[in-house]
Image: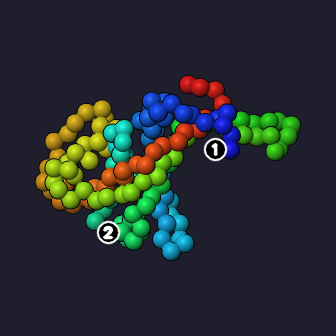
């Protein structure tokens, strides 16, 4: 990381940032064509879970190249300088991770993955009906690791 003074090295702090984020951005690339899409997500400390419809561009790209990037950010605040245009900046906390994405096919695994997502937003477990499980594809990104960065005041 170029700015070591902004690096967050404590894994527990990085995980808190991820758990407090509302959106995960999923980065995909196939044949030199990048694609970044926001997704709702769940996080169990080691993997990120998200769901998709039954077909679409994300699925086509993940099938062609399962190597993905995930990005999270929070506490974003524009810092203005009333006198100098190029002195504007942002305060933020961000986390980036890389890993391999896998589709969860077993109904029990899909239910666990969907519950990770639901727990992220609702702080509770849910009973999921078979129809919901059948009409939704659920994915897990097995992370190689996470790196964090902070600019500005700590929360």
Provide the secondary structure element on which disc 2 rests.
Answer: loop
Q: Nearer the viewer, residue 104 or 120?
A: 104
Give residue 22's position: percent from left, percent from top: 44, 41
- Rendered-image quadrant of the N terminus: top right
Give residue 41's position: percent from left, percent from top: 37, 46
Answer with mark 1 or mark 2, whichever residue precedes in sequence.
Answer: 1
Please indicate, yes or no, whether residue 20 appears anywhere in the rendered image. no
The disc label shown at residue 55, or none? 2
Q: Nearer the viewer, residue 107 or 9?
A: 9
Please indicate, yes or no, whether residue 134 appears anywhere in the rendered image. yes
Q: Residue at x 22, y 36 (%)?
A: 125
The disc label shown at residue 130, or none? none
Q: Nearer the viewer, residue 16 or 98?
A: 98
Provide the secondary structure element on which disc 1 rests.
Answer: loop
Residue 77 is left or right of residue 81, and the answer is left
Q: Nearer the viewer, residue 16 or 87?
A: 16
Task: For label 1, count other residues whose C-alpha is less than 10 Å away and answer few (under 14), some (14-19) or many (20+).
Answer: few
The answer to whether 155 is drawn above or below residue 134 in the figure is: above
Q: Quadrant of residue 18?
A: top left
Residue 81 is left or right of residue 10, and the answer is right
Give residue 149's position: percent from left, percent from top: 59, 38
- Rendered-image quadrant of the C terminus: top right
Look at the image and name its color scheme: rainbow
- Give the alpha-carbon distance from disc 1 to disc 2, as whole Å: 37 Å
Q: Quadrant of residue 63?
A: bottom left
Give residue 130's position: percent from left, percent from top: 13, 54
Q: Residue at x 54, y 33 (%)?
A: 9
Q: Residue at x 85, y 40 (%)?
A: 84
Q: Which residue is mark 1?
A: 1
Q: Residue at x 68, y 44 (%)?
A: 2
Q: Residue furthest bottom?
A: 31
């Amino acid at each position: 990381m170029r700015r070591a003074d902004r690096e967050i090295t404590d894994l527990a702090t990085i995980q808190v940032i991820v758990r407090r984020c509302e959106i995960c951005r999923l980065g995909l690339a196939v044949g030199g064509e990048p694609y970044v899409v926001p997704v709702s997500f769940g996080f169990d400390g080691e993997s990120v879970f998200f769901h998709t419809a039954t077909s679409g561009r994300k699925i086509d790209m993940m099938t062609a190249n399962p190597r993905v990037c995930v990005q999270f950010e929070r506490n974003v605040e524009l810092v203005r300088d009333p006198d100098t245009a190029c002195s504007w900046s942002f305060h933020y906390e961000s986390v980036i991770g890389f890993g391999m994405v896998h589709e969860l096919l077993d109904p029990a695994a899909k239910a666990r993955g969907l519950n990770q997502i639901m727990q992220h937003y609702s702080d509770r477990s849910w009973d999921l009906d078979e129809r919901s499980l059948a009409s939704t594809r659920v994915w897990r990104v097995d992370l190689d690791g996470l790196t964090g960065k902070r600019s500005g005041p700590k929360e």
